Amino acid sequence: MTETWNGVKVKTQLLTKGTRRYGEKLRKGHPEFLVAHDTGNPNTTVQQNVDYYENTYNIDWDHVASAHIFVDDKEAIVCIPTTEKAWHVLYNATTDNEWYGVDANDGAVGVEISYFNDKKRSQKSLDNGARVLAYLAEYWKIDYKTRMPGHQDIQDDKQDPGNLLEAAGYSRSTANLDKIVAKYYKKDTKQIPQLQVEWKWAGTFVPNTPIKVRTAPSMKGSIVSNDVMKYTGVKVIKFNSIVKEDGYWWISYTSKGKKYYSAICKITDKKERVKHEKYWGKLKWKKEDK
Ligand SMILES: [Zn+2]
């Protein structure tokens, strides 16, 4: 059986029921969020991954892992129905419970995307993965902006889909995947006007509490450090722009040649004016920008 999802050829090759595909329904019978993965195993195709699952369909419980859908540069294969449970995030990881009130295995669909040493193939695979995720998000009415974490965002020891993003020439943050999904998530983009989120307002900031360093202005941006002052080693952070994202104001600055973001306050002002907020530290605007 072959379908097409946002231009990607999708086959169904369901696993024999065993430990990998146990056959249990998701707790609500449908996915409540999506988890983006990469295979962690470069240069493998979806067919190779699904065949491996099938050859080990009843692997012992100590070693079991599985996911619903694999995507590569040519096609996608559904190997576990998206209404059933699969084992793609450790049960003892707690972030999924904090964010969504359920373990990913019991409430989410896991999508595994291939990556390759060949950058072009990785880019195509990433693009196909984004198309499949956008299709699933629309189909199950899931907001990909808040309900599509990467595995790395919800389980501490994981680096996916960062491996895929890096292989395709992006930085490792899941926010980069979101941007590609946005291209294919049609329902949403038609309705929401593109609002300005970044202003080239420079200044200095000295936090009065440890604030995190992230690779993107989003709670989903990878955390580089929990304390910007320790990480940068400066007494005053010089920022070159501010960004309004995810319910926070962020400063954007460069450290060790790389661009980072830190949240400096929650947005509480009804008109969302940054200068009306209470910051987590002392902020000074550069004179000429006033
Ligand atoms: Zn994963």
Image (cartoon, rainbow, N blue to C red):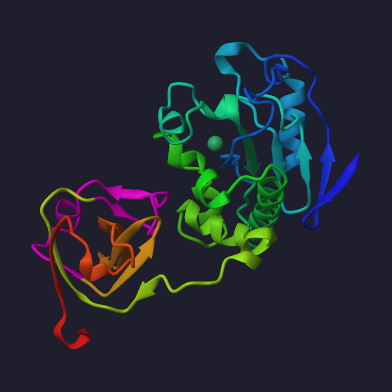
Q: Quadrant of the C terminus?
A: bottom left
18, above or below 104, in the image: above
Q: Quadrant of residue 185?
A: bottom right
Q: At 78% from the left edge and 49% from the top edge, which residue is drawn?
A: 75
> Residue 106 at x, y = what percent?
58, 24
Horizontal side, residue 69 vs residue 232: left or right:
right
> Residue 182 at x, y = what percent?
60, 61
Residue 226 located within the stretch drawn in magenta: yes
> Residue 66 at x, y = what percent?
64, 27
Q: Which residues are magenta?
A: 212-238
Q: Is residue 119 visible?
A: no
167, above or below 30, in the image: below
Identify which residue, 10 or 250, lies in the foreground: 250
User: Looking at the image, in which quadrant does ligand 1 appear?
Assistant: top right
Horizontal side, residue 14 vs residue 107: left or right:
right
Image label count = 0
